[in-house]
Image (cartoon, rainbow, N blue to C red):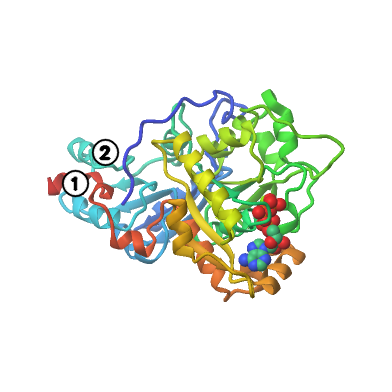
Amino acid sequence: MGFLNRDNGKPTEESALEVANGARLIPRITIQAFCEHSQTAQLVEATLHDRRMSKVALTTHNGGLDGAVETYKSNPTPNLIIVETSQQPDEIPAALARLAEVCDASTRLILLGHVNDVVLYRELIRSGVSEYIVLPASAQSIVSSITELFAAEGAAPIGRTIGFVSAKGGAGGSTVAHNVAWAISQHLRQDVLILDMDLPFGTAGLNFNQDPPHGIADAIGASQKMDQTLLDRLSSKAANHVSLLTAPVVLDRTFDFEEREFEQVIELSQRTTPVVVLDIPHVWSNWVRHTIATIDEIIIVAEPDLANLRNAKNLSDTIKSLRPTESEPLLVLNKVGVPRRPEIPPNEFATSVECKLLGQIGFDAATFGTAANNGQMIAEVAANNRANETFKVIGMHVTGRNTPERAVNRSPLKLPTFLKKKRA
Ligand SMILES: Nc1ncnc2c1ncn2[C@@H]1O[C@H](COP(=O)(O)OP(=O)(O)OP(=O)(O)O)[C@@H](O)[C@H]1O
Ligand SMILES: [Mg+2]
């Protein structure tokens, strides 16, 4: 379900999203449009000429509401759907209900219609449609609506922050973080930014075969000068929809950060990119604790042995007490089935740690070793490896997508507003 109105955002930093003439830049969102007429498709495509749209990935498709419903029965929904409908006002709510059933919670909807009717407008906005624009309209008015939704002062940040932390050094937090980021970019086709927070030893650059001159150290060093343009310049594109802020990996200085030193970079990242993956090193410092307390989702990556179990339990308890009202930490077991190694059974491990076990990844030295040495993802060196499915499941879960398990247990609270009204 989706396109609920949200107005609980924190105030934005004024300058962050402003471009030279005062217009606000729309973040790196994905938009899919479903148009009934070719002129409407042209109109929607014309929005790309507006510089506020320069970061946006937009595709247009044939078919109005019904086309969108068919598409999203089997495909993930983007950040924003624009749909043209020439249905009669009394038919639109039912068609919207069908669309809402197949939309994710975070997806917004702008409807382009042919009926200029204020009662219809009010009903649509009440039921969760973000905007209703009457055709004919100008491309500029569509861009302004999108800007209002995603870049307005006070708009909630679009990015979801997902941190990966190893229960013990070498358990695979970084490998899992990078592959999950990749899986999200591939399956949701949304932009993902990976922050490599392991400044002296990070492997994001190596794992994506990138050696850019700038990265996360420059972003933190820039402090007050940091804005969206600088963030763009400091990050490097690792693949389609994947960008990195790499670690400098130098030992000529030490990296002792203040508690809130990463805060600005994380906030700016989530204002500009729909998914922000944090590769958190296995250290326990003020800034790690603070980061863990403030991000959206945390995944503890552990190997199934006793030291990992102890550390994972400590982490889990601490995280839960640091953020009692936020989502609980999740568990991924990695390197399961090392030959001849006595191991704790996954379910027993998860029960002791009191965390939901999101997935387990087998020990596979050949595949993971080849991927690491080549600077490639597991999916690139072994497309059929079972780990890829696990990376996808983790990615869909932490981005709030409907995994098969969620679809079956769909909570009534997740229904769109107009459906709830009808059932009430
Ligand atoms: N399932 C697996 N099977 C085999 N090798 C793996 C697996 N997962 C990760 N590895 C390998 O284990 C090593 C450590 O992985 P990684 O760097 O991701 O761990 P980490 O917990 O982030 O380490 P650090 O403590 O240095 O941050 C890497 O060489 C990686 O290729
Ligand atoms: Mg690591």
Residue lying at 70% horizontally and 44% vertically, measured from the top left: 198
Vertical order, 223 against 417 (above or below): above
Which residue is label 2 attached to?
A: 125
Query: Cβ(mark 1) to ligand 1 < 8 Å?
Result: no
Q: Is residue 274 visible?
A: no
Give the image quarter of residue 68: bottom left
Q: Which residue is mark 1?
A: 420
Q: Amino acid at mark 2?
A: Ile
When the figure is inspected, residue 181 is found, relative to residue 286, above or below; the finding is below
Q: Identify the secondary structure beneath mark 1.
A: helix
Quadrant in which the C terminus appears: top left
Few, some or many residues within 10 Å of mark 2 (<14, 14–19, 20+): some
Q: Position of residue 11 (x, y in %)?
A: 46, 25
For badge 1, the amino acid type reads: Lys
* Label 2 vs label 1, nearer the camera: 1
Residue 232: % across, % down? 67, 40
Q: Is mark 2 within 8 Å of ligand 2?
A: no
